[in-house]
Image (spheres, coloured by chain):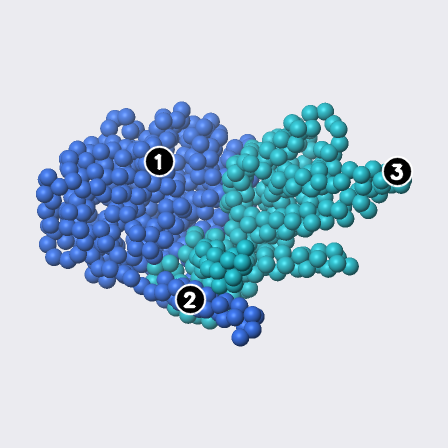
Chain colours: A cyan, B blue
Amino acid sequence: MTWLSSRWKIAVMVIPALLLFSVFIAYPVVYSLVFSFTRFNGFESPAFNGGANYATLFADKFFWRSLGNTAVIFAVTLVVLIPLAFGLALLMQRRIPAAGALRSLVFAPAIIAPILSGLIWIFILDPHVGLLNRILGQLRLPEPEWIGGNTLTPFSVSWVYVWSQLGFAMTIFYAGLQLLPAEILEASEIDGANGVKRVWYVVVPMIRETFIIITVLMITGVFKVFEIVLVLTGGGPVHASETLVSYTYFITFSSQRYGLGMAGAVIVTVLGMIVGLAYLIVARRRQLA
Amino acid sequence: MTHTARVMRVGALTAAFAVLVALAGCSSNGSGPSSGSIPTLDPKTKVTLTFDIQTADPKTNSPQVYAAVKEFEKENPNITVKLTGEPTDTHTQKMQLAGQTDTLPDMFWILDSDARQLNKAGKLVNVKPILDAANLTSRYPATTVKGFTDDGKTYGQPSSQLVTGIWYNKKILADNGLKAPVTFDDLLNVVKVLHAKGITTISNGSNQASFACWSFLRDLSNFGWDQKVNGLLTGTTKYNNPDFKKLYEHIDQLRKAGAFADNVATTTYDQIVSRFTSGQAAMVDGGLWMAAPIQASSIASDAGFWIGPEFSDGVGDQKVSMSVPAAPWAYSAKSAKDPNKYAAIAKWVEFWAGQAAAQTQVDGALPPSTTWNVKIPESQSVFKTGLAAAFAPGTHAPANQPDLMVPTAVGTAMYDSIYGVIEGQFTPDEAMDHVQQALDQAQ
């Protein structure tokens, strides 16, 4: 293997991957970054305008609203999605009847295109014609504005995101749990650890890597929530339910302020990187401690 | 050189290369249309034209255009038109990207504001010489030709005539002891009576259709839009002026009186139409293009068309009927560099300005923008009703629909402002400030 270990030959073999990375990852990012400092409407030549786009965005109340909504989805993902997916994986691991069918059912939303997920949920959550409010109405209970209102819309979007990602996260947890050595679990049982203690002191530490992977995937997913918002509310009423990505899309394409949109895209990228990296650093430090 | 230094150097070179490529992408590569006389197409030469429009599945959703294309191909057997389409938003983005990358289709629908940008970049065919050569310029109202002329070039021809207004269900009104409204006060009364009986008065929705507020855009013309527009664009007039405030306060009055359904934010355009055609709403905010689905519905015989309310506190003549040229068909200057394609495009331009295309449009319940005499089929009773109301004696058309006279970013802010009041998100003052902010940024 001397031939392969030559440094310049390794460098040559890295070139195809480097080219692909440069064209499809680095170039769009740099392109966005360059355009974020310009005034550009899509047709005329872009004109350098310094940090004006960033100043405009930071003064835009809808931008802050979209950031707030993204934060709500982020919080719901951390607090609800990950624990729920882990809990379900633990349940599925038990010897329960039709476990395979149940796993498939829970996983099913993950294979539905987000646009279809949105369509399904609009018929459930719509305040006027939705199934949920029809049932609540029959029961003579208050009929909230699940979507389309000011308060609940980001939570409803979060719930649809949780619903669509739950099966995927559960499956990865389930796969992680399957890899745990049975003898260690048995030993902990013999040592007197009950169910909760076994999960907390044995299972969780042993699948820490799985937790890290899922959390990073879900966090980065939060910064990509777009289709669900588009279908459920189109970002409305008047941008009240926009996420960072959907609002960036609006200012770029609907409003045709490409420079401003690229500034939004840069902010989304940077935020995603910061949150993802921060989590990874904290998780690694705990692992080393 | 250390390993770290080498990595940094490679990284810096890669970044510099990417910046150079990005900056190269910024440069304009506009190309002018071919000039000189219009070439003639050799009948033996086969030409295929790509034609991309703003509706998905054109055969189903734009039957008039589809029928016109078939008619055109019949008249010109050596020309094949490949008609494709996608929903308006998607199409608009597609054309913007195609304009940037110089990959425009041969013929396409485009927003007027985008067409002007492409025209400035020299990417569109000037259709005036084609129309002049075929003696067809006079078949368009002079204001239409002027409206589509910029920098001395006529960059397109109207895809149809945009006639907006409010369709109403006579039966719902009569069953509740109401007459068709004429003034805003009449409309407010209708809303109050119907709301008390649990009936939605005006069907509209902003989900993926933020532009679907046509009647309120028309109402801006009742408050002096045409007199104010130049000042708005140059910054000498403010959008948050006392006249427009009256209109926004009227919209707020309608909201408070219960004119709209409580799920406006989640309702799509298709749902707006079906709510009206299924008899679940007394009115729908729309235009003559809705005649076909209304004709096909069970309420066809009960449908009436209203140009919109007259306001006692409005500015100027209140019988405003919003009948203006719709967004244009435009033609790629790059394609026209090929003499055969240019000749084929010229044939289509002539065809669309001709009588056969006008009749095809009317047969499909779409008003043409030309002045040809056409026969409205007996089967198009709803369309006939709409036409009669829209072009009734005493009505007058404004210069254009307000959102089509301003940059796209301002137009979207106007939609936001109107739906903001309808959905209770904005007070009238906040709504107007929102548009003024967009105007300030556009300047």
Q: Where is residue B368 in the image (x, y as percent from the top left)?
A: 24, 40
Occupied quadrant, residue A156: top right
Residue at coordinates 22% horizontally, 54% vertically from top-left?
B333
Q: Please tell me whether residue A68 is drawn above or below residue A121 in the rendered image.
A: below
Q: Where is residue A203 in the image (x, y as percent from the top left)?
A: 77, 43
Chain letter of mark 1 equals B
Give the spatial CA distance, label 3 vs label 2: 63 Å
Q: In front here: B274 or B282?
A: B274
Chain letter of mark 3 equals A
Q: Which amino acid does label 1 sit on?
A: Asp
Compared across the picture, whether B284 is left or right of B394 comes to right
Same chain for the residues under marks 3 and 2 in the image: no
- Density class for disc 3 (Cα within 10 Å; few <14, some 14-19, many ≥20) is few
Circle 1 or circle 3, nearest the eye: 3
Q: In front here: B21 or A260?
A: B21
Occupied quadrant, residue B371: top left
Circle 3 is placed at which residue position?
A: A190
Give the spatial CA distance, label 2 vs label 1: 42 Å
Circle 1 is placed at which residue position?
A: B57
Can you see residue A180? yes
Can you see residue A263? no
Q: Please tell me whether residue A134 is drawn above or below residue A206 in the rendered image.
A: above
Chain letter of mark 2 equals B
Identify the element where label 3 is drawn.
helix
Residue at coordinates 67% horizontally, 36% vertically from top-left?
A142
Q: Residue B17 carries which label?
A: 2
Identify the element where label 2 is drawn.
helix
Q: In front here: A37 or B192?
A: A37
